[in-house]
Amino acid sequence: MYESDGKNGIGLRIGKFIMIELDHTFKEALPIIEKIEKAGFEAYFVGGSVRDALLKKEINDVDIATSAFPAEIKQIFHKTIDVGIEHGTVMVLWGGDSYEITTFRTESAYQDFRRPDKVEFVRSLEEDLKRRDFTVNALAMDKNGHIMDYFEGQKDLNNRVIKAVGSPQERFHEDALRMMRAVRFVSQLGFTMETNTQKAIADHHALLGKISIERISVEFMKLMQGKSRSKGLELFIHTELYAYCPGLEQHKDKLEKFARFEGSLSTRSAAWTMLIHFLEIPTAEVTKFLKLWKCSNKEMHEVQLEVKTVRSRLTHPYTAVDLYQSGLTIALEVEHILEQMHFPANIELVVEQYENLPIKEKKDVQISGNEILAALKIKPGKWLGQLLEEIEMLIVTGQLANDSEAILSWVKNQSGIGDRSVN
Ligand code: ATP
Ligand code: MG
């Protein structure tokens, strides 16, 4: 497929390679490749962006691989950030964007199934592509749109197959996360899994136990949001990877039921919400479950609210209090989820109902605790918070006008308030 050109060791016989029209995302990065080449090194687009370009999918960011060592890249470009220099990655700031440039490298001696003991920088593109996970991710493209394909990646793209580069057993022993990555690519791309690759996952699924939850979670969320989630989940269950994921071990049947749900889940919170719903986790235990997955406090809070909202919405239309507590974003997301469940949803009605709420948040209440204390000359206490909450709910439900005078006169009529008076 390639021959020596007597200069850089390997030259490519262009005629044999597919050439594609460069998308603007690649075009914007071309000056970077040209600058590296001018300095006497090789540089290519690699990985996901090349795969997605060949699939005619939208490209978000491009990764560049180069024969230049990190120190050499830092000499070529003025503005760089050391984002992962020990792994050969330097971030270059260029034209208002940032690009990750990674030196060709090999990885060796994986003793703990999760990270290479040694990363070695090399000058050969082929060596670099060899360490990549799947054939469709082991493609490179030069500045003219010529594809470099040493492992039949294009054939597998055409056949829509996820296949490990080299021996799948070895590759999964090197880094067990690749097993999760394989099922997430099936889910994202709708591909099938090559037989030996799938068998190796089924045989070695227990290695996933060596991988940190944080890394598993990234891939799991991508799996959950993929267009072919059902396909990905079926493999995730069939190969028994699920047994090494927190809170899923005991729930094979429920996961299978979830795998039959075809609706799309386009956000992380929608994905967590539906998973939790299918797993039948009680609303009060949502946070405990998400903690196992090391979710952030913000995400835990959001998902818990979303789960609660879906469940109440499945039993009755939104009340003013439901909508006030969920907020518009979550309420709309829940309507989208309901649509996916073929449950009658009504987005316009929800927007209208929300707009008609007398207040949208606590700070909209036209009186403060201090104002109540000053007007009534009473001492503060625990009761004040409860009173303010009561006022808030009365306003939301339209039982009290959001007006300081009306609120004060309501407060004055409450029995027991006078007992706290200062005088
Ligand atoms: P996405 O579109 O989701 O970002 P991607 O293919 O770009 O997909 P990344 O996780 O961004 O995936 O990784 C970029 C590239 O790095 C991959 O295409 C692959 O070539 C390589 N890669 C990433 N993780 C691994 C891994 N664990 N083992 C081997 N190669 C990997
Ligand atoms: Mg990527």
Image: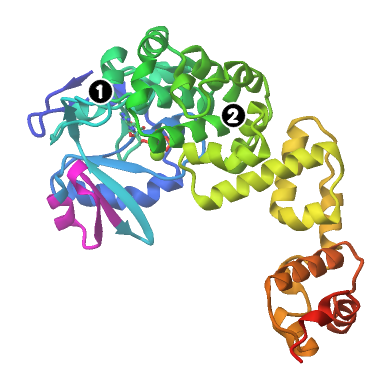
**Element type at mark 2:** loop
* Residue furthest left as drawn: 6
Q: Which amino acid type corresponds to the residue marked 2 in the rendered image? A: Lys
Residue 376, picture quadrant? bottom right
Q: Residues within 10 Å of mark 1 (few under 14, many from 20)?
A: many
Write the residue at 62% across / 20% down.
259
Q: Position of residue 237 (x, y in %)?
A: 52, 16
* 3D distance between C-alphas at marks 1 and 2: 29 Å
- Which residue is under mark 2? 227
Q: Nearer the viewer, residue 275 or 352?
A: 275
> Is residue 155 shown to the viewer in this render?
yes
Is-magenta flag for residue 41?
A: no
Q: Quadrant of ligand 1?
A: top left
Residue 325, picture quadrant? bottom right
- Which residue is under mark 1? 174
Ligand 1 contact, mark 1 (Cβ < 8 Å): yes
Q: How is the image coloured?
A: rainbow
Write the residue at 29% across / 42% down.
64
The answer to whether residue 236 is left or right of residue 375 is left
Q: What segment is highlighted magenta in the picture?
A: 71-92
